[in-house]
Amino acid sequence: MSMDHSFRRLGFATTLVSACALALASTAGAATLRTGYEPGGWGATTLHSGICLQTLICPSVTNTVVKGPPGTYEHTELGSLTGVAARTDVTWTSAPFTYNGAQGKRSKNVTFVMRRRSNTTNLLSVTGNTATYSANLISAKTGNTVAEAVRNANLRPTTKFTRVGPKRLVGAVRRGRTYRIEVVFTFLNGVAVVPFATSDFRRARIVARRHVSRHHRHH
């Protein structure tokens, strides 16, 4: 083997080792600031619309906060559908909280996470019936939506709590502002008589992250 060829191989190996060392140094020198906001104090309102309002036989709805395994969760139960077309919107709203970014730093990576389960099999077995859910961040001052996480996702039946997210919040979330999390269940049913349906969620929260260098953190 020629000396020139040996030098080329040595140069390639040195470059490869330098690149790996640089990658490791970049990883070691980086950190992720993270702050989670998981408010409590949930309350629910129910709104009916459709023909059921005219006949005064809209589905009964029960909204409760349940303290039990696997922990505290928010529970909505839609009573037996009476055979009259109806739309039922259940809006759960958290207590207000102040958003301060990722450990006080501005974040462009703000996501929504929760767990949910539903017993909607009988409801969805009828053609034309639907069950969906949405999740938003709203202003505690005005009640207006400032960021959207989930829009009209299918409320498919699940026997166990299933993770939703992380879903990127679409909208402006600003440090120092006070917000609430809003989770909305929407049930649409026709004229078929259907037994009850339920939907639960727990640990609804937003998480702010920011990647920074360790050098930047200390200055």
Image: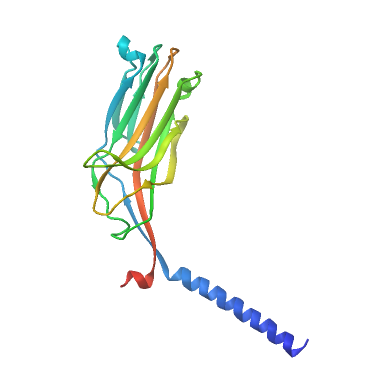
Where on the picture, by quarter, is residue 83?
top left
Give the x, y percent position of residue 120.
45, 25
Please tell me which residue is depicted at 35% across the width and 42% down the height of the picture: 203
In the picture as drawn, the residue positioned furthest to the bottom comes out as 3
The C terminus: image quadrant: bottom left
Relative placement, left or right, of 98 versus 210 is: left
Where on the picture, by quarter, is residue 209?
bottom left
The N terminus: image quadrant: bottom right
Q: Is residue 33 above or below residue 190?
A: below
In the picture as drawn, the residue positioned furthest to the right comes out as 1
Which is more toward the observer, 201 or 106?
106
Please tell me which residue is depicted at 34% across the width and 40% down the height of the picture: 136
Which is more toward the observer, 67 or 16?
16
User: Can residue 70 be seen here?
Assistant: no
In the picture as drawn, the residue positioned furthest to the top comes out as 55
Give the x, y percent position of residue 191.
43, 12
